[in-house]
Each structure stands twice: as C-alpha cells, then as structure tokens.
Amino acid sequence: MGAWIAVAIGGALGSLARHGVNHVVQTRWLTLRFPAGTVAVNLAGCLVIGLLAGLIASNRLTLGLYWREFIFVGVLGGFTTFSTFGLDTLTLAQSHSSTNAVLNVALQVIGGLLAVWAGYAIGLSRG
C-alpha cells in the first residue's frame, strides 16, 4: 500500500508542476498556436528521467522502492504526460495544421530522446 500512496502523492505534485509550467509557457512566453508548454514539460521530464537513470546506473544514486515509485511513476509520470502530446498532435492535424503537427512530433520525440541521452550521459559521467 505504501507504493500506491507514494505514487498518488508524487502524481499529484507532478501534475501540479506540469500545469504550472504549461501555463507559464503558454501565457507568458509564446503566442503561437503550438503546444510549446507540452514540449517544455516533456523535454524537461525526459532530461530529468535520463539524469536520474544515469546516476542510478553509475551507482552514484541509490533510491529505495518507495522513492523510485514516488519520483519515476508519481512525479515524473504526472509531469510528463505523453497522452497530452498525442492529443495536441491530433488536434493540430485535425485543424489542418499538418506542418505544426509534424513539428510537434519531431521536437518531442527527437528532442526527448536527445534529452534522455544527455541526462543519462551526465548521470554516468564522473564529475
């Protein structure tokens, strides 16, 4: 039961953080019809999960089961919602913004993979 509670609390915090970042990006920094808030959240989340995975793989960070559940499943799961990515892309495609739909997929998939790689490499490095 403890892992479920950890996930629930982490998910709530991650969702609140995601909403905050999305709101700031969409209302203050960009006026384009593009899901820039979702891009920012997903790239940041990919970088953080890559960094943590790299630190764990290099034995520079040890997390107990509940902490892993809290951070990876809860906080990051609530923060980086690729379901929103899918819905944003579908909405762009349906509104005849195919260029923005393709751009959205490219930025999030390629950028996310690069961010995970970068975070993992940083986590593995001995610094």
Image: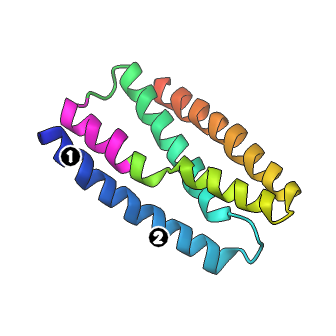
Classify 10 Å Cα crowding around label 1: few (below 14), some (14-19), many (20 and above): many
Seen at 63% across and 40% down, the residue is 112
The residue indicated by pointer 2 is 20
- x and y percent of residue 114 in the render? 66, 35
Judge left or right: residue 122 versus residue 25. Answer: left
In depth, the one of 124 and 113 nearer the eye is 113
Residue 39 appearing in the image: no
The residue tagged with tag 1: helix, strand or loop?
A: helix
Identify the amino acid type marked 2. Answer: Gly
Identify the amino acid type marked 1. Answer: Ala
Judge left or right: residue 103 versus residue 28. Answer: right
Q: Is residue 110 above or below residue 74?
A: above
Residue at the left extreme?
1
The residue indicated by pointer 1 is 6
Q: Measure how far apart labels 1 and 2 are at the Cα level.
A: 21 Å
Seen at 11% across and 40% down, the residue is 1
Query: What secondary structure characterizes most of the magenta part?
Result: helix
Is residue 66 covered in magenta? Answer: yes
Q: Quadrant of residue 109?
A: top right
Classify 10 Å Cα crowding around label 2: few (below 14), some (14-19), many (20 and above): few
In depth, the one of 50 and 106 nearer the eye is 106
- x and y percent of residue 18 in the render? 46, 61
- x and y percent of residue 15 in the render? 40, 60
